[in-house]
Amino acid sequence: MIRRPFEQWLFEDVEIAFNIERIKNLPLLMEWLDVPKNNILSYEIDKLRVLLSENVETWNEDELKMMFLAQFLGQFEFNNAPAYRVFTQRPFSIQTAEVEANGRVEWFIATGKQTPKKPFFFLQEYKPEKNSGNDPLGQLLIAMVDAQILNEDIKKPLFGCYMIGRFWFFVVLVEKSYSISKSYDATQTDDLSEIVVILERVKIHIHKELGLPAPIFGRL
């Protein structure tokens, strides 16, 4: 029996405990990341990009959250009650014959009002590059595996992202396989414009899953 909080899981631990495998360039990941190039950022988002580039090496974790991440994610209107909403710092737990694990998930989108029901997308944000400690991929994967169990449908893909300072990595989990993107540097205009479109596609996926009208975007 493995008993361990989420923050102590390495990605290799998750692979072994739950028999999942990293695959290079899963088709669903490639489709998600196949976005137009040379988009123009909105004034609000470009201001955040400049703020990040000027401070990312000195911000602590809370400053990164409050000064950049919260304001950036707020541009996307991910709260769409009563259909789905953003949850933060919510407890998750896994109980199987082989594993007991629990922890708080930083930020995710799910159905539900007070209690998350069906998760779609997870974001695990981390400290600036110099101070990153635990394994952010491991913590993201254990949360996504937990969501598979909660959803009671292993065939439903899950989407996620983890941050290390300025760098964003996107992850897809499909049944027992997962795939990771290249790094995207949020201080760079071209990379941040791609991050924006990738996040907009999360909303498109959620709306399709829930049978909602297609979302309307005007962020770029």
Image (cartoon, grey):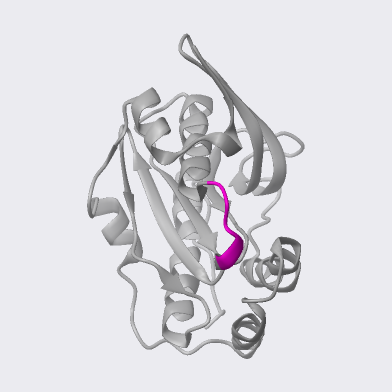
Q: Is residue 131 above or below residue 102?
A: below
Please give the name of the residue rendered at 63% of the width and 59% of the height, measured from the top-left corner. Answer: 78
Q: Main secondary structure of the magenta part?
A: loop
In the rendered image, which quarter is residue 94 located in? top right
Q: Toward the viewer: 92 or 131? A: 131
Measured from the top left, where is residue 191 in percent x and y?
43, 79
Q: How many marks?
A: 0
Measured as percent of width and height from the top left, residue 130 is found at 57, 66
Left or right of 207? Residue 190 is: left
Left or right of 212, for residue 178:
left
* Residue at (53, 82) in percent of width and height: 187
Look at 32% across and 33% down and name the residue there.
175
> Left or right: 10 with respect to 48?
left
The span shown in magenta is: 130-134
Is 132 magenta? The answer is yes
Q: Is residue 210 magenta?
A: no
* Residue projecting furthest to the top: 97
Q: Residue 157 appears at what percent x and percent y?
A: 38, 41
Whether 171 is drawn above or below 111: the answer is below
Q: Quadrant of residue 68?
A: bottom right
User: Residue 13: x and y, percent?
Assistant: 41, 31
For the point 31% across and 55% down, the residue is: 29
Residue 60 lies left or right of residue 152; in this view the side is right
